[in-house]
Image: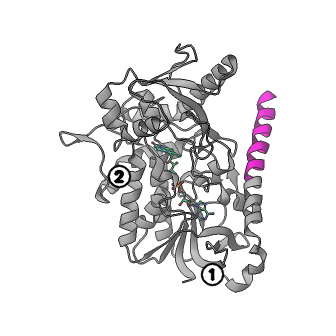
Amino acid sequence: MDTKYDVVIVGSGVAGLFCALSLPQDKKILCISKDALEGCDSFLAQGGICMLRDDDDYDAYFEDTMRAGHYENRKESVEIMIKSSQDVIGDLVEFGVEFEKKDGQFVFTKEGAHSNNRILFHADITGKEITSKLLARAKERENITLMAHTTMVDWVCQDNVCYGIVVADMDGKTTAIQADVTVLACGGLGGVYQHSTNYRHISGDALALAMYHNVRLENCDYVQIHPTTLYTKQGGRSFLISESVRGEGAVLRDKDGNRFTDELQPRDVVSKAIFDKMKEQGTDHVWLDFSPIPKEEILNHFPNIYQRCKEAGYDPLTDYVPVVPAQHYFMGGIYVDKDSKTTMEQLYAVGETSCNGVHGRNRLASNSLLESLVFAKRAAHDIANTDSFKKPVDFDNLVNMDGYEDLPSIMEYYHAMVMGEIEKEEKLRAAKEAI
Ligand SMILES: Cc1cc2nc3c(=O)[nH]c(=O)nc-3n(C[C@H](O)[C@H](O)[C@H](O)COP(=O)(O)OP(=O)(O)OC[C@H]3O[C@@H](n4cnc5c(N)ncnc54)[C@H](O)[C@@H]3O)c2cc1C
């Protein structure tokens, strides 16, 4: 295994792959994934990706993002994201990504808390369409090495400069990899929750390492709960029923069949309404009624959701479908500036792992794929424009490889650190807000 690269990227979701593809082709890049290369939440995204349709929609799009984020968003980041959206969608199209079109023009859909239709989609598998095309392009590039089932277990750093990472293969064999730049694109933290729409292995490892190495985090208690995941008695990853189903007209009903909330409010508000209703009626779920959506629309726009509901024993064309809120997205993360730089030199963070402030306290639907892409590209440009990097005096002596023998315990410890930080932040914020 080669152990020296210009850039090492941890994560093969949209953020990691787009960063790799946006870097100059003379950079030697390693991109790793803890699971299969396809084992990332990016592949699961259903609803779509936002794009500024025209200048007339700018103010409304900005306001919708801010309102959903309770006005705690970093305005500069929101502005960058919206203004870069057409450019990034153009890149995706060049990479071969296809979005729904009619008469040669993009078709835009809507989701909760959007005042206009501004979401591009590819049936209900938009994430798979985008990420599989990016992965295919990355495989074609000679300068990019993709490595699956390779887990980052530590960083190699000294005096607040990152010089690479320690990885473990499936047999637990560890290797130190040296790189001028390390990019964390490790996704969210759903794996530390009992009920989550995320893959179980996506569990905030980079956040634990940031805590361990004194890198700044931000808003670790800002965890989004998605209002509508398919309720089943089995455990494992919760299946999401996209917000665009409600955007197209589906309504929520309580155990008596009564509608009890406006389904298109921001996610945190809808989730609270559902939890309150479940508590009031002593139920484990509420119902989603697809009947306001025309049959053709259900079958053509939501074929995957339709199929999964049927497999669980509910036909959306004739039955109410049981739904329950579950952990879905992480708005907080490793603090980064507008170029995705963390507070450690030569260490960047992009995608859901990072917090550039776009989402504030709560994410607007379909902003996360876009945010991941825009700020991954900015990281790549910043790296490309950096003239020189610090080199370690003696890389091999910076890390004690004997310290990683008991990997399961180390990873368990990381998960406990992440959960502990979320709970601590929640308590601190509640105390501050009570004053
Ligand atoms: C069910 C679902 C539906 C969604 N729908 C939408 C939508 O419609 N629109 C939208 O904008 N967003 C949506 N999202 C959110 C969006 O998909 C994610 O925010 C986005 O894909 C995150 O991309 P990422 O590249 O940051 O991380 P991911 O795609 O999650 O990739 C993380 C990568 O990091 C790797 N990794 C993690 N830890 C380690 C480690 N220690 N060592 C090595 N590798 C590691 C993983 O293996 C993986 O390759 C949805 C999310 C889910 C779960």
Image-based side of 37 in relation to 295, left or right: right
Name the secondary structure under disc 2: helix
The type of residue carrying mark 1 is Lys
Q: Is mark 1 within 8 Å of ligand 1?
A: no
Residue in view at x 61 percent, y 71 percent? 170
Q: Which of 305/82 is in front?
A: 305
Residue on which disc 2 sits: 87
Q: Which residues are magenta?
A: 418-435
| Residue 161 visible in rendering | yes
- Position of 435 with respect to 126 (left or right) is right
Rendered position, 391 above or below 360: below
433 in magenta: yes
Residue 231 — which label? none
Say which element carries label 1: loop
| Residue linked to disc 1 | 391
Q: Residue, x 80% and y 28% (percent of image)?
A: 434
